Image (tube, rainbow, N blue to C red):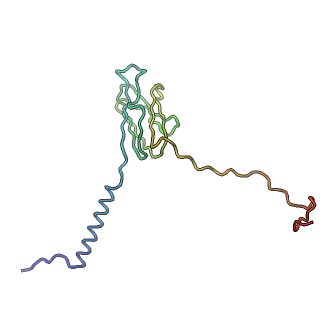
Amino acid sequence: MRRWRGLGRPGRLRALGLASVAVLLLGSHSALAAPSLVSINIVDTPRPQEKWGYAPGARTVAPGTWVTWSNAGTDAHTVTAEDGSFDSGELDPSQGFSWYFDQPGTYAYVCTLHPWMQGKIIVGNGVSAAPTPTPVPDDSPPPPPDDGSDGTDATNGSD
């Protein structure tokens, strides 16, 4: 009769190592933060035209958030950033558009077909990170060489 003895010491260590790696890989996968998802509806009828808009009209999100606009209305609409950073193009009813916001700032947008429809996404604290200033080149000419005309010796600075 053969008896299964399991793994010897080296085999047990190898199995323990593989199990540890698997736990770390699985654990790190779940520890990674998945991006947040936010939805905004584009609404029109049965409201009067002047009440058409985005619901909600303003939304604060964390950096790393996907925002999806869904056209829940009966007319075509757009989601167009005033700064030009994103543009959905025309969205027919039931179509949607998503944009990933990874930088802090305030992003105002409008429906180009119905300009009274306006909204904004506030990412983080709503303040854009200040760009790193670019050094301004010094275009001034260099000082003239000392030719001794001021009464000093040009070679050693003495009279």
**Residue 100 appears at what percent x and percent y?**
42, 44
Q: Position of residue 59 (x, y in %)?
A: 41, 36
Give residue 92's quadrant in the image.
top left
Residue at the extreme bottom of the image, as rendered: 1
- Who's the residue at 77% across and 51% down the image? 140
Q: Examine the image and state in which quarter residue 14 appears.
A: bottom left
Numbered label tally: 0
Judge by depth and name the residue closer to the eye, 109 or 146. Answer: 146
Residue visible at 36% across and 21% down in the picture: 47
Residue at 85% across, 57% down: 144
At x 41%, y 20%, the residue is 49
> Above or below — where is 158 with respect to 67?
below
Q: Is residue 83 left or right of residue 141?
A: left
The quarter of the rendered structure image containing the C terminus is bottom right
Compared to 9, does 103 lie above or below? above
Please identify the quadrant where the N terminus is shown.
Answer: bottom left
* Left or right placement of residue 88 versus residue 149 in this view: left
- Above or below, comparing residue 110 to residue 2 in the picture: above
Residue closest to the eye, 122 or 14: 122
Relative to 153, is 39 on the left or the right? left
**Extreme-top residue of the structure:** 48
